C-alpha cells in the first residue's frame, strides 16, 4: 500500500527514473516511474507531509510536514540526515540549482506568522543550531507555494491572497510583486529551462509567467479550482489538475465532479484533451522529464502514471 490518505505532492527527480510522493499521511514514498514499483519509504514524520523535492543529482530528498519539521534524507538509504524544527507547519520546500541551499516556508498559524527560511547545507552549524542564514517574514498573506528561480538567485512565492513575488536568496529583499490571481495560488511549477513558470489557483485559472520579470503571458480558464499545473518539457502543452474543494467532494456525484486532467495548448490557451481516472480532485500533476508521460496524484490517495500514445507525438511534429 502506498498512501492511506490524499496525495499532497508528486515530484520526479531530474532524470525521471524516480517519482517521489507525499500525502496527508506521514509516509514519504519513492517509486520506479517506469513500472510503478515502490523502491522505499522515508520514515520519520508524524503528520501530513505537504511538500517534497529532490536535488539535481538525486542524492538528497527534502520534505516538509504539518508535524512542524523540515527533514533532509539520504535518497538511496532512506536515512534521515537533518531535522529542522519549526513553529508551524512547513508548506513548501525546495533545493536550489546546486543542491547546496534549501528553502522552506512555514504556515501562519497558532500565533506564528509565515516565514521563508534559507539554510546552506555546506555549513552544518546552521542546521545543528536551527539558525538559517536568512529568514524572511511574510506578515500579510501566507505563502502557499514557492519555487526557486533560475540559477538560484531568487525564489518565486505564491500567496493565499493570489499575490506572486520574488525574494532574493542573497539579501532577502522583495524584488517584485504582482497580483494576477484573485484567489489562493495552489501550485507553481517552472518550465524545463526555468524561463517560465505556471501557477494554479483557486480562482479557476492557471497562468503562465516569465520567471525573471514576472510578466503575465497566458491564462488557462476552467470552471473549477485548479490545484496543480505543469508544463510539458518537449511540447507547447500544459496539464491542469483540480476539481473542487475537498470538503465539497461528497456532495456531488463523480460524474459531475469533473476530476479529469485537462490539457491546454500553451500558445493558443485552448483545451484539447481530458484524461479521466481519479475518484476525487487531482491535487498534484507532473510531466516526466522526457515528456512521454505524466503523473497525477489525487484526493483518492492514488498516483496514476499515464503514457502518451505514439500518435500524440506524430500529431505534434506534423503541426
Image (cartoon, rainbow, N blue to C red):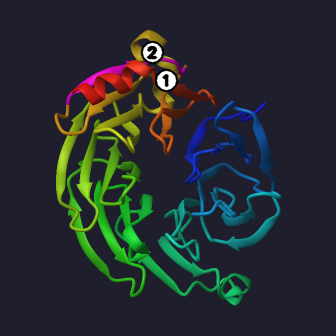
Q: Nearer the viewer, residue 98 or 234?
A: 234
Which residue lies at the image location 69% right of the left edge and 81% below the top edge? 127
Viewed as shown, does residue 301 lie left or right of 318?
A: right
| Contact? badges 2 and 1 (CB < 8 Å) | yes
- Label annotation for residue 240: none
Q: Can residue 126 be seen in this view?
A: yes
Which residue lies at the image location 43% right of the left edge and 10% below the top edge? 255
Q: Which x, y percent locates residue 271?
A: 25, 25
For residue 86, above or below residue 264: below
Viewed as shown, does residue 311 lie left or right of 52?
A: left
Residue matched to label 2: 252
Q: Which SS class for mark 1?
A: helix
Local crowd at mark 2 within 10 Å, few (<14), some, or many (≥20)? Answer: few
> Disc count in the image?
2
Spatial distance from mark 2 to mark 1, Cα to Cα?
6 Å
Which residue lies at the image location 43% right of the left edge and 77% below the top edge? 137
Quadrant where the N terminus is found in the figure: top right
Q: Can residue 258 be seen in this view?
A: no
Residue matched to label 1: 249
Viewed as shown, does residue 314 lie left or right of 63?
A: left
Q: Which x, y percent locates residue 157?
A: 38, 63
Answer with the quarter of the image where residue 195 lies: bottom left
Q: Which x, y percent locates residue 223?
A: 27, 27
Does the magenta run of residues contain 96?
A: no
Q: Which SS class for mark 2?
A: loop
Quadrant where the C terminus is found in the figure: top left
Instruction: Read off the magenta span.
Output: 270-278
Q: Which of 18 and 71 is in front in this view?
A: 18
Q: Which x, y percent locates residue 237?
A: 31, 36
Answer with the quarter of the image where residue 19 lies: top right
Does the magenta run of residues contain 271?
A: yes
Which residue lies at the image location 62% right of the left edge and 86% below the top edge? 131
Amino acid at each position: 500500500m502506498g498512501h492511506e490518505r490524499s496525495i499532497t505532492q508528486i515530484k520526479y527527480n531530474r532524470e525521471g527514473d524516480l517519482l517521489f510522493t507525499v500525502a496527508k499521511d506521514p509516509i514519504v514514498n519513492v517509486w520506479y516511474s517506469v513500472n510503478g514499483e515502490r523502491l522505499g519509504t522515508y520514515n520519520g514524520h508524524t503528520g501530513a507531509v505537504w511538500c517534497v523535492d529532490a536535488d539535481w543529482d538525486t542524492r538528497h530528498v527534502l520534505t516538509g510536514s504539518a508535524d512542524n519539521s523540515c527533514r533532509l534524507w539520504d535518497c538511496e538509504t532512506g536515512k534521515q540526515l537533518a531535522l529542522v524544527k519549526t513553529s508551524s507547519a512547513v508548506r513548501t520546500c525546495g533545493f536550489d540549482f546546486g543542491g547546496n541551499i534549501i528553502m522552506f516556508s512555514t504556515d501562519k498559524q497558532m500565533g506564528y506568522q509565515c516565514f521563508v527560511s534559507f539554510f546552506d547545507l555546506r555549513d552544518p552549524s546552521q542546521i545543528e543550531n536551527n539558525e538559517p542564514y536568512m529568514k524572511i517574514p511574510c506578515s500579510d498573506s501566507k505563502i502557499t507555494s514557492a519555487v526557486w528561480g533560475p540559477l538560484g538567485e531568487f525564489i518565486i512565492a505564491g500567496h493565499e491572497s493570489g499575490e506572486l513575488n520574488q525574494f532574493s536568496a542573497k539579501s532577502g529583499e522583495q524584488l517584485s510583486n504582482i497580483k494576477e490571481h484573485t484567489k489562493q495560488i495552489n501550485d507553481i511549477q517552472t518550465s524545463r529551462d526555468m524561463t517560465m513558470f505556471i501557477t494554479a489557483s483557486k480562482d479557476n485559472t492557471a497562468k503562465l509567467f516569465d520567471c525573471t520579470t514576472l510578466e503575465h503571458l497566458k491564462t488557462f480558464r476552467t470552471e473549477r479550482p485548479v490545484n496543480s499545473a505543469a508544463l510539458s518539457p518537449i511540447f507547447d502543452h500544459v496539464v491542469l489538475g483540480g476539481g473542487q474543494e475537498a470538503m465539497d467532494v461528497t456532495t456531488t456525484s463523480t460524474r459531475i465532479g469533473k476530476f479529469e486532467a485537462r490539457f491546454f495548448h500553451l500558445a493558443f490557451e485552448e483545451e484539447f484533451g481530458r484524461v479521466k481516472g481519479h475518484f476525487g480532485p487531482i491535487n498534484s500533476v507532473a510531466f516526466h522529464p522526457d515528456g512521454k508521460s505524466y503523473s497525477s496524484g489525487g484526493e483518492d490517495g492514488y498516483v496514476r502514471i499515464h503514457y502518451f500514445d505514439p500518435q500524440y507525438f506524430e500529431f505534434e511534429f506534423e503541426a
